[in-house]
Amino acid sequence: MKKFLKKFLLTVGSIIIFSTSVFSASEILVFQSDFGLKDGAVSAMKGVAIGIDKDLKIYDVTHDIPAYSIWDAAYRLYQTAEYWPAGTVFVSIVDPGVGTERLSVVLKTKNGQYFVTPDNGTLALVAEKFGIDEVRQIDEAVNRRQDSEKSYTFHGRDVYAYTGARLASGAITFEQVGKKLPSKVEMISYQKAKYEKNTLVGNIPILDVQYGNIWTNIDRNTASKMNIKKGDIFTVEIYNKDKLIFKDKMPFANSFGDVPEGKNLMYYNSLDSLSFAVNMGDFASTYKIEYGGDWSVKIYK
């Protein structure tokens, strides 16, 4: 019956057509948090979602975001969202300001995805990548788990999972989330990728956490202005704020095995951005490199 109603309802004697826009949601709900899986927090959020609609398809980005790291939350959404279909609803809860005056919002991007989260910087990178179609503030008088009004420290369960599930299931439209806000979100400061004076400049947004490789935000299109070829040798400088942390020469390679074991190399990662590695080693640990808005890189011949 539910699947039938999602198409239309026809009554005898008079025709009543129910707008398919009410039921246009994808039923795909994707969670992200810094909660970890050591306790029942993630399970509680999924239980709330299933309580809204047992047909929801529920998945995860990750629940291993470092505690309170808005930067990591923003990057992991940026890294993965493009591979999900239009209509997907992402619920991201990295919320060190829980219970304060920070806004609870849903961002609709121009590629037709929805992001349910505190507006604390988490949305910065997907807003830049996909563009802002519309932003709405969650009306907690309507879109909040029943009898949770006195709970101030688990909005992930009581507000975000609840609202995200209602949106993904089609129980509410995007317009019913709450009032429309200006088309902007909280941003995060970092070095944008660019090519100037025969030098590529960029940010280190994240590490390849399993292997210690260094990922930059210098995409192939920007890097192509330097006419990079396999075997070319480049000088790489890595900075934390204005302090030089690393400087060395390394070849550009297609893959790790193109250089001897233990040697440094530059390559394109799975996101088609320039990266650095030690073949069969851990670049980040070896050279004490970290990541975030304060970390930048310069590459030149």
Image (spheres, rainbow, N blue to C red):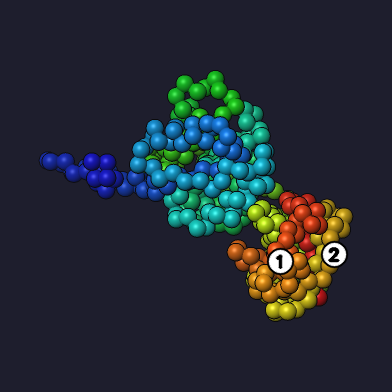
Q: Report the disc number at residue 247.
A: 2
Crowdedness near tag 1: few (<14), some (14–19) or many (≥20) residues, C-alpha within 10 Å: many
Q: Earlier in the sequence, mark 1 or mark 2?
A: 2
Q: Is residue 281 visible?
A: yes
- In this image, 178 relative to 265: left or right? left
- Which quadrant of the figure contains the C terminus? bottom right
x, y percent for residue 209:
66, 53
Q: Nearer the viewer, mark 1 or mark 2?
A: 1
x, y percent for residue 221:
64, 71
Instruction: Kindly identify the amino acid type of the residue bearing the numbered disc 2.
Output: Lys
- In this image, 51 relative to 281: left or right? left
- In this image, 89 relative to 186: left or right? left
Identify which residue, 97 or 233, lies in the foreground: 233
The residue positioned farthest toward the left in the image shown: 13
Q: Report the disc number at residue 279.
A: 1
Identify which residue, 268 or 145, lies in the foreground: 268
Q: Residue at x 47, y 55 (%)?
A: 84
Dots 1, 2 in contact, CB < 8 A: no
Q: Residue at x 45, y 49 (%)?
A: 88
x, y percent for residue 7:
27, 48
Secondary structure state at the residue bearing disc 1: loop
